[in-house]
Amino acid sequence: MTTFKRITTVLILLAMNTLYAQNSPFFNKDEDPKPEGSKWKLVKNMSDDFNGKKVNQKKWQISGQGWIGRAPGLFMAENVKVTDGKLQITTTKLPKSITKNGKEFTHGGGYVGSRNGMTYGYYESRMKANKSFMSSTFWLINENKGVTGCDKRTTELDIQECVGQIVNDAQWMKNFDQAMNSNTHSRNIPEGCDYIKGTSKGGGLMQGKVYDDFHVYGVWWKNKDEILFYLDGKLVKKVTPPADFNIQMHLRMVVETYDWNPVPANGGMVGLSEKDRTTSYDWVRSWKLVN
């Protein structure tokens, strides 16, 4: 076979694999939970393979949408880029601290949020975490600007929330760098509304650290009462949210700081290369069930 034919064959196979991968979510054999007589349909305006040269800002917002970050981690659009077929958010230590809204920021993170939202469906991303004390996340939350009544409450669905370096010695954080840490949250309940404030935990342990390799983190938001979490194509936990999960939510891919995993004494970036400090998203896909 000539070199030209060999390259052409490889390109065709890659294209076929890409098309095949987008026919349905990533599941192991016999793990696909779709009901008989239905199929998964890709929601294009909330999915991206990041094969372009820059962030598609028709799909994604990268300035924080009014949220500047949790001090001391400031969201910085320049820390977000698309390269080598991946969305990358890089952590940084600022050369000089910045004061905003009365708070001091010493580190830079990044925020990517979907412009579009939906309710029940399957959401997944192939992600590799950074090695720093700052987070690597993939989650959903509702937007309640302009909303009135009981739907002004907050529902949050954390698919993966992890750190590369654990600074807190609390028992609940023991495996935070080698697990799919998933939650459903109900909070900010308007007065007079009959909803419960609370959290239900999902997720599960993996082999190795979250930054060792890419993993596929997924969730089937089945209905208002049932959430199923998937790690690398396998079901790991079913949970019931503390309150009805029936409000449209938007995707978030965020690298931030946590007050419960504080900045290490050395600043947290010593000895880490740019690659080590970068959270990479190979792709993100959203699906809905259709008959």
Image (cartoon, rainbow, N blue to C red):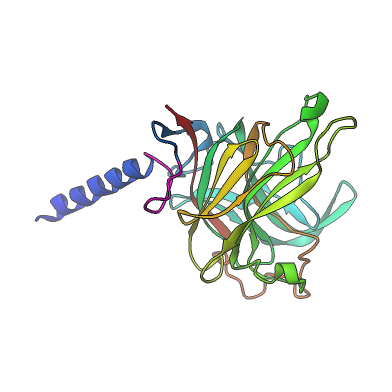
Query: Who's the residue at 69% across and 62% down the image?
Result: 134
Pick whichever, 238 or 253, lies toward us.
Answer: 238
Query: Can residue 115 be seen from the camera position used here?
Result: yes
Judge left or right: residue 50 versus residue 201: left
Query: Who's the residue at 67% across and 74% down the image?
Result: 270
Residue 265: x and y in percent read: 78, 75
Q: Is residue 242 above or below residue 2?
A: above
Query: Can you say which quadrant of the picture contains the N terminus?
Result: bottom left
**Outermost residue toward the left in this view:** 1
| Quadrant housing residue 106 | bottom right
Query: Who's the residue at 70% across and 43% down the image?
Result: 156
Judge left or right: residue 101 versus residue 1: right
Residue 151: x and y in percent read: 76, 28
| Quadrant housing residue 67 | top right
Please provide the residue range marked out in magenta. Answer: 23-33
| Number of marks | 0
Query: Can you say which quadrant of the picture contains the C terminus?
Result: top left
| Quadrant housing residue 71 | bottom right
Query: Who's the residue at 55% across and 34% down the image?
Result: 59
Pick whichever, 111 or 34, lies toward us.
Answer: 34
Residue 20: x and y in percent read: 32, 43
Pick whichever, 36 or 43, lies toward us.
Answer: 36
Judge left or right: residue 190 versus residue 9: right
Task: Look at the image and say whether residue 184 sits in the magenta stretch.
Answer: no
The secondary structure that most of the magenta stretch takes on is loop
Residue 73: x and y in percent read: 75, 56
Query: Can residue 267 be seen from the camera position used here?
Result: no
Q: Is residue 76 above or below residue 90?
A: above
